[in-house]
Image (cartoon, grey):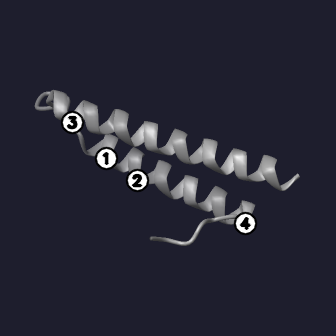
Amino acid sequence: MSKSITNKDQQVTYLKERLQIFVEVLDAIDPETTELEDIDRLISMVDDIEDKMDTFKHRSENEK
């Protein structure tokens, strides 16, 4: 299991990297050949990023 990211700068960097990966996957998709599984994977990636954002937010709120 990986170590929790508690530093705000590291959290932002992590989210930027995940968003960059998402954009790269999105750019690589050919609309003519995209299947439902591809769309489901994109939705899953967005959900994962959103979950991580919520986790980071709750960590920072608990530190106050």
What residue does disc 3 label? 38
The residue located at (50%, 58%) in the rendering is 17
Discs 2/4, front: 4
Rounded to the nearest whole Å, what is the CA distance between mark 1 and mark 3?
10 Å
What residue does disc 1 label? 25
Label 3 sits on what residue type?
A: Asp
Label 1 sits on what residue type?
A: Val
The residue located at (45%, 44%) in the rendering is 48
Q: Quadrant of residue 45?
A: top left
Residues tagged 3 and 2 counted as in contact (Cβ below 8 A): no
Q: Is mark 2 on a helix, strand or loop?
A: helix
- Of 31 and 51, the residue lying toward us: 51
Q: What element carries label 4?
A: loop
The image shows residue 38 at horizontal and vertical percentages of 21, 36
- Of 9 and 48, the residue lying toward us: 48
What residue does disc 4 label? 7
Q: In this view, does 33 lie to the left or right of 47?
A: left
**Pointer 3 local density, CA inside 10 Å: few below 14, some 14–19, many at least 20:** some
Give above or below for 2 relative to 21: below
What residue does disc 2 label? 21
Label 2 sits on what residue type?
A: Ile
In the picture as drawn, the residue positioned furthest to the right comes out as 64
